[in-house]
Amino acid sequence: MNIRRLVAAICASALVLVATSADAGTLVGPAFPPPGNVTFTAGASNPGAVGGKTNTYSNLNPSAYDRLFWGPSDASAVGISLDPGNVVTPGEFMNYDSADSNLAAGKLVFRGQTSLFDAVSGFHNIFTQLTISVFDSSSNPIAFTPSGSISGFTGTSAALAQITGTGFQVNLYAEGSYTNGSGYLNLDKLYGDANTTGKFENVSVSGGFFSDSPVAAESSTPLPAAALGGVVLLGGLSTRRRTRQARFEAQ
């Protein structure tokens, strides 16, 4: 094999290696907006009402990223507070419940604890439950994928939903019960049945997008020649990956 053929073979190999390494990108996030932007429309209701609250994301641009996922930003992204302070404290953060979640049906369930003040008998321990459901623009469930099965994901979220269309919806449904694991009522109903002097209902969900950028095309810049016996030095081969990140917090 002469020098020219050898160099051509090396160049071709370099192009293949660069494209392959760029295909499996590291997901960046949580962030808002995603690459290409998005239109966010908050639901008119609240998570503690009958049917919960449904937020809508529209006008996504799939050409702006290789993969796009949405989900809770991290392992401490969900919390409910019903006490007079109306602030979610670390003890009120909720844990992912894998047993009651249904990933294939696009449903995540989180459970935790808070307290509710009853004017007659004082504070009560309340067991909280939040269900996060994701649907596409046609109201079909979007499946969640366990985070450990997502290539390039390094965060602490339990699961993420991959978004492939130009829009989707997220329903947040908050409940509470005096009994752990059963008897859950939507929070508005729970308050209605209690002798409360005021309504303190704070449902906090920190969610966001995780994405990687499309694979960039290899440069067609001519290779420079060096005056070393006709040997061509490898150069002008470059790919560039662009990542943007975003963050969204829904309450």
Image (cartoon, rainbow, N blue to C red):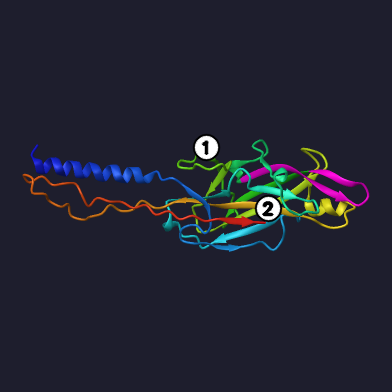
Say left or right for 250 vs 121.
Answer: left
Q: Nearer the viewer, residue 168 or 204?
A: 204
Locate the C terminus by quadrant. Answer: bottom right
Q: Position of residue 129 (x, y in %)?
A: 73, 45
Residue lying at 13% horizontally and 47% vertically, measured from the top left:
232
Q: Which residues are magenta?
A: 107-126
Please tell me whether residue 111 belongs to the stretch shown in magenta: yes
Please name the residue shown 24% across and 50% down the image: 237
Main secondary structure along the magenta-highlighted residues: strand
Q: Quadrant of residue 181?
A: top right
How far apart, in angstroms, are the residues tagged by discs 1 and 2? 25 Å
Q: Residue 127: image x %, image y %?
A: 77, 42
Left or right of 9 in this view: 93: right
SS assignment at label 2:
strand
Q: Is residue 220 magenta?
A: no
Q: Residues within 10 Å of mark 1 (few under 14, many from 20)?
A: some
The tag on residue 206 is: none
Q: Secondary structure at mark 1?
A: helix
Q: Position of residue 55 (x, y in %)?
A: 63, 59
The residue lying toward the viewer, choosing from 122 and 106, is 122
Residue to which mark 2 is pinned: 204
Amino acid at the residue labelled 1: Gly
Residue at image mark 1:
148
Query: Foreground residue, 143 or 242?
Result: 242
Q: Residue at x 53, y 43 (%)?
A: 155
User: Crowding near pointer 2: few (<14 within 10 Å), some, many (20+)?
Assistant: many
**Residue type at the position of mark 2:** Ser
Asked which quadrant contains residue 45, the reply is: bottom right
